[in-house]
Amino acid sequence: MTHRPVGLVAILRGVTPPEAVDVAAAVLGAGFDAVEVPLNSPDPLASVRRIREAAGPDARVGAGTVLTPDDVRRSADAGASLVVSPNTRPDVVAETVRLGLESYPGAATPTEAFAALDAGATAVKLFPAAAVGVAGLRAWASVLPAGTALVPVGGVDATTLGEWARAGAAGAGLGTALYRPGDTPEVVAARAAELVRVWAEHTNH
């Protein structure tokens, strides 16, 4: 199966605007493909805006835990180019697509995954990945349209990332395995470098 390149997404849950730029620079500098600030972080759209301004127009900067079409619009206004949700809500996906942004809705079943694709999703986030499992990803891939990008999120870390990559994941979202509130950019950079190394070892990325 061929995948649209998605790669590693840094989930910076709990990051604050004053530290957002340095933490984002640490993970992007280590080779991550995108950063995501969940909307249940402190003043998340300020963080998205600061990261976008610092990282430039070509960086993949996202908003996560996006639950409504209004959330999508506010995220877009802040400079997000990637919209990530824990669930599949077709109107959220449709608004994301309408605004020309990447849409990563969460799905826990093949039915939700098909609904996400029907609504125009760029990729499907397997969430929670630990519950779906690697065997689940392989089973989904056998019935979803060829080339569907599947991105496990939730419980993925350096010990399991290689297994997901070998199973055909197009990328992965890394949260607490990469960043916890209060971590320094140096600590995050070291974790990011290790995750990028594991990912590269098991993929052609």
Image (cartoon, grey):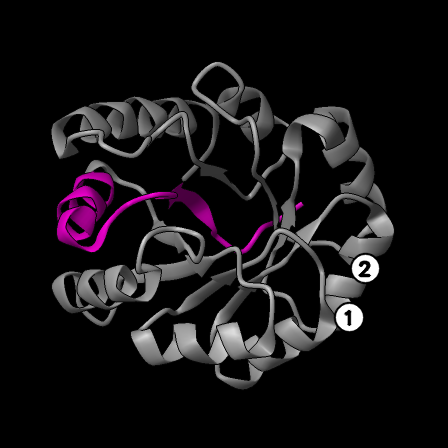
Instruction: Check disc 2: other Cα within 10 Å, few if <14, some if 14-19, many if 20+.
Output: some
State the residue lying farthest toward the front. 42
Residue 4 x %, y %: 54, 56
- Which residue corresponds to the image point at 74% horizontal and 32% vertical from the top-left? 132
Q: Which residues are magenta?
A: 1-29
Closer to the camera in the image, 6 or 156: 156
**Three-letter code, disc 1:** Asp
Give residue 88's position: percent from left, percent from top: 71, 60
Tell me the residue that label 1 is attached to. 118
From the viewer's perspective, tell me whether residue 170 is left or right of residue 146.
left
Query: Any magenta on residue 165?
Result: no
The foreground one among 41 and 145 is 41
Residue 41 numbered tag: none
Answer few, some or many: residues within 10 Å of disc 1's Cα (few below 14, many 20 plus, some between 14 and 19): few
Residue 82: x and y in percent read 44, 64
Q: Which residue is mark 2?
A: 114
Q: Amino acid at mark 2?
A: Phe
Residue at 73%, 72% in the rendered image:
90
Considering every residue shown, the one lying at the far bottom of the view is: 98
**SS class, disc 2:** helix
